């Protein structure tokens, strides 16, 4: 199988379930940003130790972003074909991030001024990933406004919003003094 298909040479891209749309349509624009977020988290993960708590969490988040990407890569008329947690972001995926944010926030003293990224490589990579996640969030808001996502049914925007908050807390944690998880 060849990597290239030539099907996109006309400026269109294939979506899940066969629909073709312009590469600059709201959905492909948003899932392109989500794809960048996956890669940015991968850059951060490359700076962590394999098997570490942070590494494992970043792998989980990258996989969850694939779920968001799948939802965004589906034309609105095919949403009913999506599987919760596999190709459709769920409310539980959003709410599951909140206790992680709370836990990680308890591990460092909050900054008392604006954060200047670059304290160390891991935190800097996480700050970059946070910016990319925020861009994916903005693109998903635009996709919602364009009718690509149903604001009453989709959880992509809240997920990305919460994810950006989590990545911010992870960066601050990596800059500060580590304290073990409270159980």
Image (cartoon, helix red, strand yellow):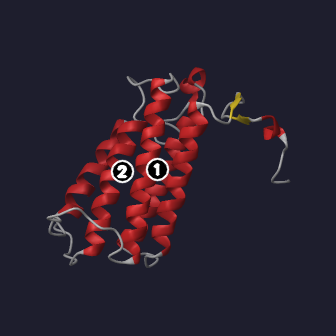
Disc 1 versus disc 2: distance between alpha carbons? 10 Å
Q: Are marks 1 and 2 in contact (CB under 8 Å)?
A: yes
Mark 1, secondary structure of its residue: helix
Asked whether residue 176 appears in the rendered view, the answer is: yes
Query: Which residue is at 18% across, 69% downward?
Result: 108
Residue 121: quarter of image: bottom left
Of callouts 1 and 2, the N-terminal one: 1
Q: How many labels does the image show?
A: 2
Query: Which residue is at 46% across, 69% downward?
Result: 45
Residue 134 % position (x, y):
40, 48
Residue 128: quarter of image: bottom left
Question: What residue is shown with label 1?
Answer: 64
Image check: 98 left or right of 146? left
Image check: 21 left or right of 53? right
Question: What residue is shown with label 2?
Answer: 163
Vertical placement of residue 177 versus 130, above or below:
below
């Amino acid at each position: 199988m060849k990597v290239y298909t030539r099907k996109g040479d006309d400026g269109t891209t294939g979506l899940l379930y066969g629909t073709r749309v312009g590469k600059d349509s709201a959905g492909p624009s948003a899932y392109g940003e989500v794809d960048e977020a996956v890669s940015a988290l991968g850059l951060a993960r490359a700076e962590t130790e394999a098997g570490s708590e942070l590494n494992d969490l970043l792998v989980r988040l990258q996989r969850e972003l694939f779920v968001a990407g799948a939802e965004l890569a589906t034309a609105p008329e095919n949403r009913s074909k999506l599987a919760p947690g596999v190709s459709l972001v769920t409310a539980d995926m959003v709410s599951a991030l909140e206790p992680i944010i709370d836990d990680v926030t308890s591990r460092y003293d909050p900054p008392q001024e604006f954060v200047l990224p670059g304290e160390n490589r891991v935190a800097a990579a996480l700050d970059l990933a946070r910016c990319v996640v925020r861009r994916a969030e903005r693109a998903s808001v635009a996709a919602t406004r364009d009718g690509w996502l149903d604001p009453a049914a989709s959880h992509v925007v809240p997920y990305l919003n919460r994810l950006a908050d989590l990545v911010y807390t992870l960066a601050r944690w990596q800059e500060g003094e580590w304290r073990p998880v409270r159980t």
